[in-house]
Amino acid sequence: MWPQVPQALRLLPEQASTVAGQVDALFLFLVAVTVFFSGLIFLLVVVFALKYRRRSDADRPRAIHGSLLLEALWTVIPLGIALAIFVWGTYLYFVISRPPAAAMEVYVVGKQWMWKLQHPTGQREINELHVPVHRPVKLTMTSEDVIHSFYVPAFRVKADVVPGKYTSVWFEATKTGEYHLFCAEYCGTSHAVMGGRIVVMEPAEYERWLAGGVGEESLPAAGEKLFGRLGCHTCHRSDGSGRGPSLVGKFGRTEKLTSGETIAVDESYLRESILNPQAKITVGYPPIMPTFKGLVTEDQLVQLLAYLKSLKTDGQAKP
Ligand code: CUA
């Protein structure tokens, strides 16, 4: 949007994602509407002060008893503008909050005061995220302690990172390069330095970078090990003969609960079921699962989730 303006004079950060231009367009529209009406009001204050000033002691203005046209106009025009902003903003909100199905998934754990990131292939990074250009990236995020906020100005992407639940956000970078990452929610002493960078690379270069991470286990593989080590597999048998439900193909399905509700099996539900198993019990199973609170870290939860998500029903599942 600002091609020829030198960096130092730019009012907005660089645009480096597919939504950046759309966010800026809406922002500039809001600014334009605000400036136009503020200017109009200031102008009219001055004009009317001069036009209707009292010219002599005998000056008596003619009384006005309302104007239907005027009232209709100042109702319809602001309503139209407000609705346009609402529809536009809602549309953009949905675009930003719905990751494309093919998005590559990265897990983010915020912690006082650093960002921990894990790639599906197992690479871990701290305060740095390497991603390929022109590929949608979905971030699934949680916090180990307090509320943080994942903010990449060049992508026009910002989302709170909240302890005890997963939030997500996505972006598709359109330019290679390095972009600032900030924490945008005050989270204690070192909030100001809780940041890092997003490194956007050519796909081939990204593959090379991935290959450089030696000896890292993929997330599902690490999760599978953990699943065994914690003894999850003794109850959650893949053939369904265990005391707990089989978890194969569970992710993305809906589940009937003993409370009569149905619930979509997503990251947040699985997480809750691991940490607070009694909260939502699947119909047909006794509430006997112990909590794993304190036994698994946020990083390990992410690995377990990646493993559970990898358990497809199409026969690729490992027993
Ligand atoms: Cu984390 Cu501010």
Image (cartoon, grey):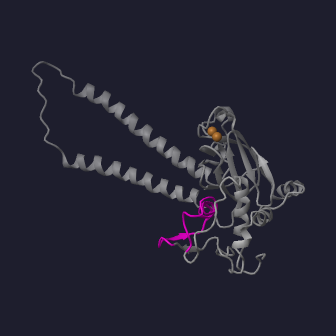
Classify 194 as above or below 132: above
Answer above or below: position of 16 versus 221.
Answer: above
Residue drawn 67% across the image and 76% down it: 246
55 vs 169: above or below: above
Q: In this rendering, does residue 173 appear at all?
A: no
Quarter of the image containing the N terminus? top right
Q: In the visual, does 260 lie left or right of 224?
A: left
Q: Residue at x 58, y 56 (%)?
A: 96
- Give the tally of numbered discs: 0
Q: Quadrant of ligand 1?
A: top right
Image: 222 above or below 183: below
* 260 on left or right of 209: left
- In the image, residue 7 lies at what x, y percent? 69, 35
Residue at the image point whose x is 39% and y is 39% from the top: 37
**Where on the picture, by quarter, is residue 207?**
bottom right
Q: For the point 66% across and 37% down, which residue is it?
A: 5
User: On the rendered structure, is 300 left or right of 56?
Assistant: right
State which region is magenta. Answer: 258-282
Near-viewer residue (67 or 288): 288
Comparing 205 with 143, the one in front is 143
Q: Is residue 267 magenta?
A: yes
> Among all residues in the image, which is located at the extreme top?
57
Q: Position of residue 111 (x, y in %)?
A: 68, 43
89 inside magenta stretch: no
x and y percentages locating residue 99 in the rendered image? 62, 61
Name the residue nearer the viewer: 284 or 130: 284
